[in-house]
Amino acid sequence: MTFSRLAALSVVMSMASPVLAQRSLNKNPVVDTSSGRFAIVNKWNQRDDDLWCAAANAARERGADWKERLYITNYADARASQYGAGTVSFTFRPTQEELAQAKSGRSSIRGVGNNMTINSANRRCARELDFF
């Protein structure tokens, strides 16, 4: 490969990388279920950290503060979900019943009651591309 082609490829990749990174954060659909409640549809079999990141972004878009907590209210696998893919339901406005189920310090997306601050969930966002 000649130097000019290598240089051109480097320029193209450096411009495309930020676009790819931003796109990867938002590729799972978000469904509003009610005020302060939404579901992330896991269409891409992402890691738990990716889903917490998507939930943090969705909560911020819906007016949540960084210090508020995200609670998992439901987990449905692909067979049980109406969306045809695993679905994790979150809220940042929990009921008293949901607060009683709360399990802080656990980050699995399959545990109803697991929770963390929106700021902590946001720290799970990947800032770089995983395949480099």
Image: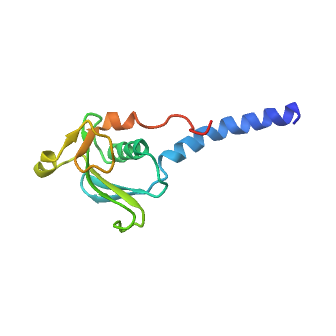
Residue at (33% x, 44% y) in the render: 108
Q: Nearer the viewer, residue 35 or 131?
A: 131
Residue at (24% x, 40% y) in the render: 69
Q: Percent x, y for residue 92?
A: 24, 46
Q: Percent x, y for residue 23?
A: 54, 47
Q: Percent x, y for residue 42?
A: 43, 56
Residue at (66% x, 37% y) in the render: 15
Using the rendered view, name the quadrant where residue 106 is placed.
Answer: top left
Color theme of the render: rainbow
Asked if residue 128 lies left or right of residue 107, the reply is: right
Asked if residue 71 lies left or right of residue 97, the reply is: right
Quick check: 25 above or below 1? below
Asked if residue 29 lies left or right of residue 17, the reply is: left
User: Is the N terminus in the top left, top right, bottom left or bottom right quadrant?
Assistant: top right
User: Is the C terminus in the top left, top right, bottom left or bottom right quadrant?
Assistant: top right
Quick check: 41 above or below 84? above
Quick check: 27 above or below 114? below
Residue at (10% x, 49% y) in the render: 96
Asked if residue 131 lies left or right of residue 3, the reply is: left
Q: Nearer the viewer, residue 74 or 58?
A: 74
